[in-house]
Image: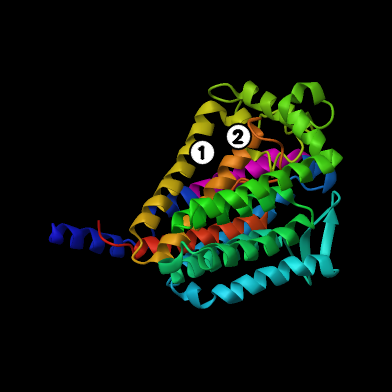
Amino acid sequence: MDNNKKKRKKIRKGLRYDPCIIIPLLILIVVGVLMIYSASSATAAAKRMDAMFFLKKQTVFALFGIAAFLICSNIPYNFFKKTAYLGLFGSLLLLSLIHLGFGITEGGATRWLKIGALHFQPSEAAKIGLIIYLAYSLSKKHENIKKLSIGFLPHILILAVFLALILKQPDLGSAVILALIAGIMMFVAGVRILHLSSALLLFVPIIFNLIFSASYRAERMLSYLDPWEYATDEGYQAVHSLMAFGTGGIFGVGLGNGYQKLFYLPESHTDFIFSVIGEELGLLGVLFILSLYIIIIFRGIIISKNAKDLFGTFLAAGITISFGLQVCINIGVTMGLLPTKGLTLPLLSYGGTSLLANTAALGILANIGRNEKPV
């Protein structure tokens, strides 16, 4: 048995890159570039006078994303222990700069940061910064994790600062995702259920107040309950997204032949790229994409379970939770299962910040996997 374990460990060490991560990742990136061109060419031609505008930009993002994965997968993951506080304060600084005159306001929200030629979304970097900090802090305090003043309060206070800065943008969706990531990570680490449930009881009324205190959020919630009733305003995206899936059927209408992307479905190359996939590649294409995501998520769970130390376990868990939540929420929105929220689909949607953040995080996950315990 010991010899078999050694052989399996040697095989894993011999594989420079985890095939259960890098193969789905590369396929998703390539499919993403193709689908972004299909979804955006008409819009780009009309608004940018160049049908390949978004294709060219996403190709550059993809190359940087692959480079980020390769670099992070070759950095020993324990290195990030040393950068935990630097990443934490760096993330908070970037989120603060948005409100100090460096933010870019689009659609009534200030979520983007522009420093020189750099134009990015700090909340994506904040997710990684918070995950690394929580993994370090939870592993360091694990022996006393059940204590309110050690396992719960310090982490919930740090989370509260992140949420305050993100809600000020305002970006309720990102705040909810960050809270879910932190809550699940603390649960995995062994923080008392009583403490977590108390925070949840406090958090839920705040969320409801935030939703119904803003008219556009309340209308979005009502349109979620019955999108066809609001098909010309708040339910417009959801209705056309569902129409795209319905048109696609089993085999799809063919790559490039979609109809909803032709100025009917807003954000077709970003938040609603999955709807375009459903229309053009059909149910089979949708199932293929889902299978690739499932492979990455299940591999992440295994890596977390078999990590050689608690920091690796919590870090892998945090990355997998974050990735899985983004996938589930985006797909849920496009299929009308969740209220509309501006959230990209990892590795597929247009956007450099999201792509770089996800590829870097998956690179760290792959490195943890290369050093996992033999099973």
Image quadrant of residue 220? Answer: top right
Query: Horizontal and vertical percent for residue 110?
Result: 81, 57
> Which is more toward the observer, 148 or 3?
148
Residue at the spot of label 1: 289
Span highlighted in magenta in the image: 26-42
Q: Is residue 118 visible?
A: no
Query: Horizontal and vertical percent for residue 359?
Result: 54, 58
Query: Horizontal and vertical percent for residue 73?
Result: 45, 65
Image quadrant of residue 119? Answer: bottom right
> Which is more toward the observer, 176 or 294?
176
Residue at point 50%, 51% (across, down): 193
Query: Mark 2: which secondary structure?
Result: helix
Q: Of label 2 and label 1, which has the lower sequence position?
A: 2
Q: Main secondary structure of the magenta part?
A: helix
Q: Amino acid at mark 1?
A: Ile
Give the left or right position of residue 38, taking residue 45 as reference.
left
Residue at point 77%, 60% (across, down): 112
Residue at point 77%, 29% (across, down): 223
Q: Amino acid at mark 2?
A: Ile
Disc ID at residue 277? 2
Q: Is residue 31 on the magenta stretch?
A: yes
Q: Is residue 4 above or below residue 101?
A: above
Q: State how many labels appear.
A: 2
Q: Check whether the beta carbons of the residues at disc 2 and disc 1 lie within 8 A of each other.
A: yes
Image quadrant of residue 17? Answer: bottom left
Q: Is residue 148 on the magenta stretch?
A: no
Disc ID at residue 169? none
Q: Residues within 10 Å of mark 1 (few under 14, many from 20)?
A: some
Give the left or right position of residue 138, taking residue 330 as reference.
left
> Which is more toward the observer, 314 or 373?
314
Q: Is residue 192 above or below residue 68?
A: above
